[in-house]
Amino acid sequence: MFGRKGPAGADTGGPQQKGGFLTKLRGVLYGMASHGNVTAALRTRMHLEHLFMFITLGDMLGIPVLPPYYSLRILPYAVPNIESWKQRVFRERDFTDAIY
């Protein structure tokens, strides 16, 4: 019973459980220490990208901020993000969006 080992290759998952435990511990420590900072950094990045798109391509919304020459120079780089940017801008919002 005690000290008895199973057949070779029939590992009970000792190292896997240890890795699982370490993974879980790492997740808990990440959540306690840096999840808020990472979320705030991602939110700041989103707002800066949103502001950049608004300044460069405000013509599409009817708000000319930057002369069209510069907008046309940036347009090839911004084309992949235009559709999602328009959806974010025109999405209905309420006061609970500001909380979260």
Image (cartoon, rainbow, N blue to C red):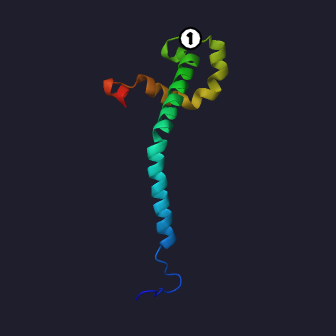
For residue 81, which quarter of the picture?
top right
Q: Residue drawn 44% across and 46% down?
A: 31
Q: How many marks?
A: 1
What residue does disc 1 label?
A: 65
Q: Nearer the viewer, residue 67 or 95?
A: 95
Of all residues shown, which one is farthest toward the front? 2
Name the secondary structure under disc 1: loop
| Kind of residue indicated by mark 1 | Val
Q: Residue at x 66, y 13 (%)?
A: 69
Q: Give the position of the C terminus as an image quadrant.
A: top left
87 or 94: which is nearer to us? Answer: 94
Answer above or below: position of 67 versus 38. Answer: above
Residue lying farthest left?
95
> In the image, what residue occupies the spot 44% across and 23% down?
89
Task: Please determine whether, in this image, residue 73 is positioned above or below residue 22.
Answer: above
- Depth order, front residue of 12/45: 12
The location of residue 76, given as percent across then percent down, is 64, 27
Q: Give the answer, above or below, for where 11 lies relative to 52.
A: below
When the figure is inspected, residue 42 is found, relative to residue 30, above or below; the finding is above
Whole-percent x and y of residue 36?
Answer: 45, 38
- Quarter of the image with the N terminus in it: bottom left
Crowding around mark 1 (Cα neighbors within 10 Å: few <14, some 14 to 19, many 20+) is few
- Give the image location of residue 9, x and y in percent: 53, 81
